[in-house]
Image: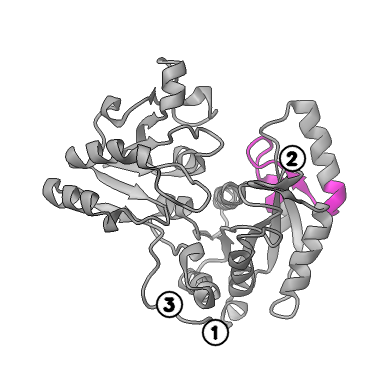
Amino acid sequence: MTRRVALLAHEGLPDRAKTAVGVLRYADAEVVAVVDREIAEADPDARVTDYVPEVPDAPIVGRVADAPDFDALVIGVAPIGGGFDESWRPDVRIALEAGADVVAGLHYFLADDEEFAALAAEHGGELRDVRRPPDDLTVAEGRARDLDAEIVLTVGTDCSTGKMTTTRELYEAARERGVDAAFVPTGQTGIIIEDWGIPIDRTVSDFTASAVERMCVERADHDYLFVEGQGSLIHPAYSAVTTGLLHGAMPDSLVMCHDAGREAIHGYESFEIPNPGYVAEMYESLAEPIAPTEVVAGALNTSGLDGETATEATKRYRAQLDAPVADPIRDGAERLLEAVL
């Protein structure tokens, strides 16, 4: 039976609530409501498709108490640092008191919260912290390069440039074409969608490469592995996790994601984003001593642009990368998939 879920996305839909958007697009679940107090207050009749086109529709409500009955509440906001906003507490409390599960991809573990743990035990709900890595990770062994599967990793010029979305669109396009492919989730959104995976941005630094290596080995019976990327080599806070992914997955090819018009690192605006062609060369250079690879295509997020401006941005990005470019949502992923295959 399809699980009924409510998505908590306070003051985040759609830009800050990337986990909510990912669940709406890709998860095998019935979304009964999105909880966003800012939108609901401004428009009591708001609907999801007013803000996120081409996904199953649902009402936007201001509180969890206003949502139709659901089996699980999913924290759909991904704040910088992965903290828990105390203004969410009443909504989580109401969900647990109703006997629902609560699923979170935060660095703050709900299961370690005394109030939430007590409510879950009392009412029979489960607290699932998907960013909690397994306890038995160790250092990588350099095994990914020996796998028969072709490994494709998405990388980016920044965080929140569409790496999970691009990976998912490539995977689904490959499956539609009859390619034997698997999606390898490395972050909270992908893990919630797939119901498996290791959150590599929560691993001990020495074990990050091992985490993605383990997942690739586990899915090595497929012809293609599409690995969800994280962070960016030029990000002042998250470059370490990007490097671990690059060296642990040992990808055969890279697809580089960029947000059209973004000139500085999101949340760190004093750090400019260099020419994407230069960033692509950085990825290839860093991979070279471990497992040579190349950027074969570029995914460009043009969601904030009109058609003509998006076309010009795509042409510019194509020239910078000297590779095929497409917006996987606006244009579809076929052009990118052709470059990968």
Amino acid type of the residue that numbered disc 1 sits on in the rendered structure: Glu
Task: Tell me the amino acid under the disc marked 2.
Answer: Ala
Judging from the image, what secondary structure is the residue with disc 3 in? loop
- Where does the image place residue 164, in percent across and percent down from the top left? 56, 51
Q: Residue at x 73, y 70 (%)?
A: 293
In the displayed structure, 237 sits above or below 5; it is below
Q: Quadrant of the N terminus?
A: top left
**Mark number, residue 137:** 3
Which of the numbered marks, if any, corresponds to residue 323? none
Of circles 3 and 1, which is in front? 3
Instruction: Classify residue 258 as left or right of residue 26.
Output: right
The C terminus sits in image quarter: bottom right
Residue 102 placement, left or right of 315: left
Q: In this orientation, does residue 252 appear?
A: yes
Q: Nearer the viewer, residue 233 or 306?
A: 233
16 above or below 226?
Answer: above
Tell me: residue 90, above or below residue 45.
below
Which residue carries the number 1 mark? 141
In this rendered view, identify the residue nearer to me: 311 or 104.
104
